Amino acid sequence: MGMYDAEAPVDQLAHYPSLAGRSVFVTGGGSGIGEAIVTAFAAQGAKLAFVDIAVEPSEALCERLSARGLPAPQFRRCDIRDIAALQSTMADLAAINGDFEVLVNNAGNDERHKPEDVTVEYWDNRIAINQRPMFFTCQAVLPGMKQRGGGSIINLGSTSWHMAGGGYPVYTTTKAAVSGLTRGLARDLGPWNIRVNTVTPGWVMTERQKTLWLDEKGERLIDQSQCLPGRLQPWQIAQMILFLAADDSAMCTAQEFIVDGGWV
């Protein structure tokens, strides 16, 4: 199994002893990149908790991981637009798994839209999905991370705004803002040994992307734009996130780590 295959060659990938038993919280962990993140942390022996609005795939993921003999994640359905519910859910999950030492802000939605069609209501809704929860999950984990003496926050960005991608201007606005959030919080939280970084995926071959957006034109664009051959897979994003969550990256903060095959 090669490095570009959809399934991670798990017997060839790094194992991080510092992640064993570490309390981890992931948003949007039920499918796509989120599923790969949850799976990767479970394989490291972490104590996982995640939220998603899609119940069926999230529960199926938990069952698959348990069937493999991996630690069963704690899953709760939560609409991250409801900040009070999100923070309350996080508190409940932290009471079960212990204060979170790792936060992965993965949830997002790249729905396409035209500039002339955007209403104030649509703008606010996109912000409520793609931007606002990132700050308030960070706020929620702060007391626990301070008490534990540190932690790692990993925010998911996007190459869309780096490449001046069109077709979803509110989305690119929210994803450009991730870098500002990461760098500002890294300065504020550094004294407590809390690291904050951005992981920025390129065009990852999730089922959603392949179903909705990938066509022959898209395949040609990938071939022309990436420095590396092959197709970017969810597990490859997860591997960068594992590194930033582990003690191996102890002095990495305020940075953006782009995983896109060399596109931007």
Image (spheres, rainbow, N blue to C red):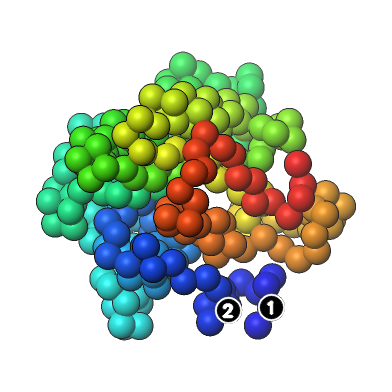
Residue linked to disc 2: 12
Residue 32 on image: x %, y %: 50, 59
Q: In this view, does 230 lie to the left or right of 41?
A: right
Three-letter amino acid code at the position of disc 2:
Gln
Which quadrant of the view contains residue 140?
top left
Residue 79 position by quadrant: top left
Identify the secondary structure beneath mark 2.
helix
Say if residue 228 shows up in the picture: yes
Q: Position of residue 218 (x, y in %)?
A: 77, 53
For the residue labelled by badge 1, is the local secondary structure a helix, a strand or a loop? loop
Q: Please give the name of the residue rendered at 71% of the width and 63% of the height, measured from the top-left corner.
A: 231
State which tag comes first along the sequence, 1 or 2: 1
* Residue corresponding to mark 1: 2
Does residue 82 appear in the picture of this structure? no
The C terminus lies in which quarter of the figure? top right
Residue 85: x percent and y percent? Answer: 20, 37
